[in-house]
């Protein structure tokens, strides 16, 4: 890949993985090849975690165990580990400007909350204690 080429996300990635890739590149446009390789790996992990999350969403968080007892879906732990590893990789890139942790955290938070409706509980005005 020539140095002047703009890095592109992989076509097979999930939308949140592509978004994370784009956000990190926007925060650090002149990313070295070694760090770019790490970013690709992190986005691979995010995309795989998203694919596993689809399975969990389809089958449910609780499945039947070996004796028929209800147990947590085995992919729940895998998704958590993949997302943690992806964030650790992004943090290890030690990017300048907007921190890698910030970009990675924003991407993961966006994924976490994008599928959930926002609920806001109004804060009641409290009278002053004095």
Image: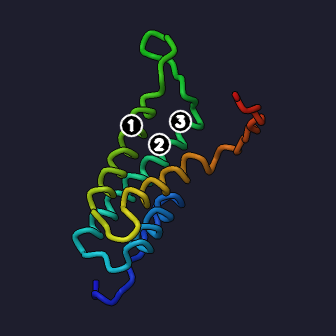
* Mark 2 nearby-residue class (10 Å; few <14, some 14–19, many ≥20): some
- Please tell me which residue is depicted at 52% across the width and 58% down the height of the picture: 16
Q: Position of residue 72 (x, y in %)?
A: 48, 23
Give SS at disc 3: helix
- Eyeballing the image, is 4 above or below 60? below
The x and y percentages for residue 34 are 22, 70
Q: Count neighbours of disc 1 (C-alpha within 10 A) and say few if under 14, some if 14 to 19, many if 20 or more.
A: some
Q: Residue furthest left?
A: 34
Foreground of the two, 35 or 12: 35
Image location (x, y in percent) of residue 110: 55, 53
> Label 1 belongs to which residue?
78
Q: Whole-Å distance between the Cαs marked 1 and 2? A: 8 Å
- Residue 75 figure quarter: top left
Q: Residue furthest front?
A: 130
Category of crowding for the residue at label 3, using alpha-carbon neighbours closer than 10 angstroms: few (below 14), some (14–19), many (at least 20)? some
Q: Is residue 4 left or right of residue 15?
A: left
Residue at coordinates 50% horizontally, 18% vertically from top-left?
Answer: 64
Point out the image quarter for the N terminus: bottom left
For the residue pair 8 and 35, the one nearer the viewer reads as 35
In three-dimensional space, the C-alpha distance between marks 3 and 2, rounded to whole angstroms, equals: 6 Å
What label sits on residue 56 in the rendered view? 3
Judging from the image, what secondary structure is the residue with disc 1 in? helix
* Disc on the earlier residue, 1 or 2: 2
Name the residue rendered at 42%, 29% in the picture: 74
Q: Are marks 1 and 3 in contact (CB under 8 Å)?
A: no
Residues at circles 1 and 2 in contact by the CB criterion of under 8 Å = yes
Q: Which residue is mark 2?
A: 52
Residue 14 in percent (x, y) is at 50, 58
Number of numbered discs? 3
Asked if the residues shown at circle 3 and circle 2 are in contact, with their CB atoms under 8 angstroms apart, the answer is: yes
């Amino acid at each position: 890949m020539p140095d002047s080429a703009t890095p592109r996300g992989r076509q097979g990635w999930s939308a949140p993985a592509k978004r994370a890739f784009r956000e990190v590149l926007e925060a650090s446009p002149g990313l070295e090849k070694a760090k770019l390789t790490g970013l690709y790996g992190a986005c691979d992990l995010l995309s795989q975690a998203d694919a596993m999350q689809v399975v969990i969403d389809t089958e449910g968080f609780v499945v039947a165990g070996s004796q028929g007892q209800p147990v947590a879906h085995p992919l729940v732990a895998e998704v958590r580990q993949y997302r943690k590893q992806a964030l650790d990789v992004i943090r290890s890139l030690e990017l300048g400007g907007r921190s890698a942790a910030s970009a990675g955290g924003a991407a993961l938070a966006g994924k976490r909350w994008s599928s959930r409706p926002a609920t806001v509980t109004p804060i009641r005005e409290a009278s002053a204690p004095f």
